[in-house]
Image: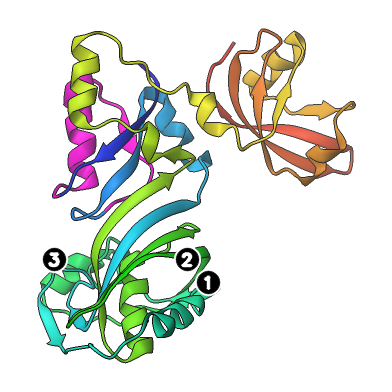
């Protein structure tokens, strides 16, 4: 079995737990995921099965979320799972103020990851260092937030704003909630998070564990084909002789190719029978445009 599973991750378990459970259900050793979700988060968790684990690095990097940000609170983990550090009533805050502040987080920004995160510092995970009581200064990192849309606004002592966020890789929504609270001088923390899209997979097409188990019992489960998750990459079809040489690790000099290939770094490679062979790097050399094998998925 090889391909991808669009899993709707449940609340309260880690992404690693999800991988282990899929491994047991499918009786498959090679299983990996395409981007960690916190235990308190739900939604799309791309799961790679079998040889498709080698393709995880080529999936679409962008993600989308629906988040609830609660203002007036600051916590150790930047979400409701952590200890409350400060709490203040924020009854005077307006939606217009929140909307104006959120606009400042769109585009390319610098963001400091949460202290409780899986980022490694000095060979250790930040959450392990935080739990051990060590205070580590983490440098801000460049991330990109494509769009933030306000979905709902609820007033009260601790007002909440629901937002839809489209962003690039490495963006922490917990950090965004924390930084929004800091900008508004109210404090802020993440109250709920659903990932609605990841690696090109959408929440509307995802399977819960219960649905997966039912399909397995009925023998109707079919993984997403490996190449179907890579349709954001341009594709090239090689004649039989070149396809065989490419699969053997040889570089192929392209003499007839569409002009748009010049803007590509990597391509999906197929043979004349429309069989997906793997991923190739495209290099413009002194001798011409070269197709260099990067990952041979199906050798000939």
Question: Which numbered dot is residue 106?
Answer: 1
**Front tag of 3 and 2:** 2
**Is 69 included in the stretch rendered in magenta?**
no
Contact? badges 1 and 2 (CB < 8 Å): yes
Marks 1 and 2: which is nearer the front?
2
Give the vertical position of 37 relative to 253 (above or below). Answer: below
Residue 39 pos. (x, y %): 19, 53
The residue under label 3 is 81
Compute the Cα span from label 3 to label 1.
Answer: 26 Å
Q: Which residues are magenta?
A: 12-37
Residue 252 percent across, percent down from the top left:
77, 26
> Which residue is rendered at x = 73% and y = 43% of the image?
264
Label 1 crowding class (10 Å Cα cut-off): few <14, some 14-19, many 20+?
some
Q: Position of residue 259 (x, y in %)?
A: 87, 37
Q: Which residue is mark 2?
A: 148
Question: Going 20% across and 66% down the picture, which residue do you hit?
Answer: 127
Q: Is residue 25 magenta?
A: yes
Q: Is residue 210 visible in the rendered structure shown here?
A: yes
| Residue at x 84%, y 28% (from the top left corner) | 254
């Amino acid at each position: 079995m090889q391909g991808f599973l669009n899993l709707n991750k449940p609340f309260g378990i880690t992404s690693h737990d999800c991988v282990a459970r899929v491994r047991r259900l499918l009786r498959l050793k090679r299983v990996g995921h395409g981007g960690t979700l916190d235990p308190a988060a739900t939604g799309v968790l791309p799961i790679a099965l079998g040889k498709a684990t080698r393709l995880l690095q080529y999936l679409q990097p962008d993600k989308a979320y629906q988040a609830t940000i609660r203002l007036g609170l600051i916590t150790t983990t930047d979400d409701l799972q952590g200890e409350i550090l400060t709490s203040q009533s924020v009854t005077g805050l307006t939606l217009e103020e929140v909307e104006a502040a959120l606009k400042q987080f769109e585009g390319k920004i610098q963001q400091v990851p949460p202290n409780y995160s899986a980022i490694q510092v000095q060979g250790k995970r930040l959450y392990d260092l935080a739990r051990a009581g060590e205070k580590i200064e983490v440098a801000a990192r460049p991330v990109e937030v494509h769009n933030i849309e306000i979905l709902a606004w609820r007033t009260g002592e601790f007002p909440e704003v629901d937002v839809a966020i489209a962003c690039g890789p490495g963006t922490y929504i917990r950090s965004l909630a924390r930084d929004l609270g800091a900008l508004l001088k109210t404090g802020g923390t993440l109250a709920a998070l659903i990932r609605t899209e990841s690696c090109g997979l959408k929440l509307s097409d995802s399977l819960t564990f219960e649905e997966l188990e039912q399909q397995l019992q009925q023998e109707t489960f079919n993984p997403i084909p490996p190449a179907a998750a890579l349709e954001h990459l341009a594709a090239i079809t090689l004649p039989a002789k070149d396809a065989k040489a490419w699969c053997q690790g040889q570089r192929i000099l392209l003499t007839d190719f569409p002009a748009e290939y010049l803007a590509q770094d990597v391509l999906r490679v197929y043979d004349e029978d429309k069989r997906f062979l793997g991923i190739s790097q495209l290099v413009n050399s002194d001798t011409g445009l070269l197709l260099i094998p990067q990952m041979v998925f199906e050798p000939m």
